[in-house]
Image (tube, helix red, strand yellow):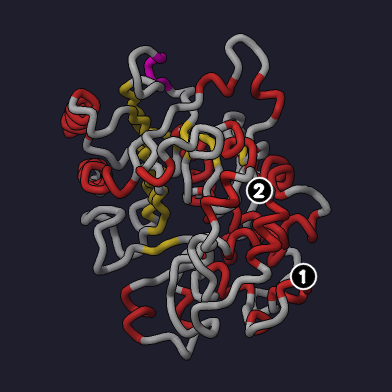
Amino acid sequence: MPWNLDRWNGVTQTIQRHVTQNNLPAVSLEIGDRNGPAQSFHAGRDRLTEGGKPVSEDSLFLTASLTKPIVALALLQFVEQGQIGLTDRVTKFIPEFAGAGRHAVEIRHLLTHTSGLPDMLPDNQELRMAHASHDVFLQKVCEQSLAFPPGRAVQYQSMGFVLIAEIVQRLSGQTYSQYLDETIFRPLGMARTCLGLPPSWNHGNPSPADAIVEVAVPLPQQGGADWNWNSAYWRQLGAPWGGLLSTAADLGKLCRCLLTHGDAPHKTALWSPALLAAATRNQLNGLRDLPEEDRRCKPWGWGWRLNWPDSATFGDLLSPQAYGHWGATGTLLWIDPDREIYAVILTNRPWEDSMSQIVGLSNQLAALWTPE
């Protein structure tokens, strides 16, 4: 096993200190390699106020933007099936997206954050306060002006994933939540993962929904108990840019699948090695109008953020081939294919307030790796 577990006590001590100091009220993490999980740890309680239950391996975290690369993986299955090409225009599948320069947006622009769409819509908060559905967000995105012609810059764009999810729906004839469940979560045994809380999860004693960890919401969401991250509305919406509920153990199953070139349990291949290799290398190199600095310093695969050389988001000790994603609720997932290891870190304090602590933990976890 490629781990120096003599350092593991230092990891758990750091987590306990962060929980005691309320830097990270709740933490659940797992590290592993292609052969299975190596260590996991859970600390804190699932409520921000007094009371609540201790965090355990069954605790569900709102993973925020860890959702994006998983939705991208769903779309990429249709690439392997020959149903779409990544240079296809979005309007081929969503005709109502046409107009105002949007006809030039290709699917690859959505997957690499080069579409010119915004991160959030200008009236994002008003839409959430009105409990807007996926269809309403889609309509708004189809009317949205682009900040720049597609392929000319890198701008993080959550709204591109509204379109990606819609293409999945139109190609599959299912909701994107159903498609993800049937083609990714179930084959991988991710029984405690959902994109959009199913009604059945609210039943039982205890019910799965009882295990959802409360998130410390940022200032703009405070007072929005019926629409913020902790609301029934948000949990049930299943936003394809940030609504995934999961556990560290379930996300570890996905990581191991990617490390074994797409093999799920029982040798079911969810993705081919060829597709995963392409999805996790710098796809900005194919965009000739992109500034060289963006191509070099902000590399994206198809839905996956690569290990940016000028940012310590994943930490400082990973190989250049590492890829992953972060989440605004204080989450991080990375996979290092060069070393064949992965880490999942789930917390409940917003990324803007917890980044330094999470990056520090990531460094400690990466330091556990040792050549075999």
Residue on which the image places disc 1: 93
Label 2, label 1: how far apart the Cα atoms are: 23 Å
In the structure shown, which secondary structural element does the residue marked by tag 2 occupy? loop
Judging depth in this view, the residue of 24 and 128 nearest the camera is 128
Residue on which the image places disc 2: 132
In the structure shown, which secondary structural element does the residue marked by tag 1 occupy? loop
Q: Is residue 13 above or below residue 331?
A: above
* Badge 2 or badge 1: first in the primary sequence: 1
Q: The N terminus is located in which quarter?
A: top left
Amino acid carrying label 1: it is Phe
Say left or right for 154 vs 124.
left
**Label 1 CA crowd tier, 10 Å (few <14, some 14–19, many 20+):** some
Q: Is residue 244 above or below residue 121?
A: above
The residue under the point 59% across, 31% down is: 232
x, y percent for residue 274? 58, 66
Report which quarter residue 271 is drawn in.
Answer: bottom right
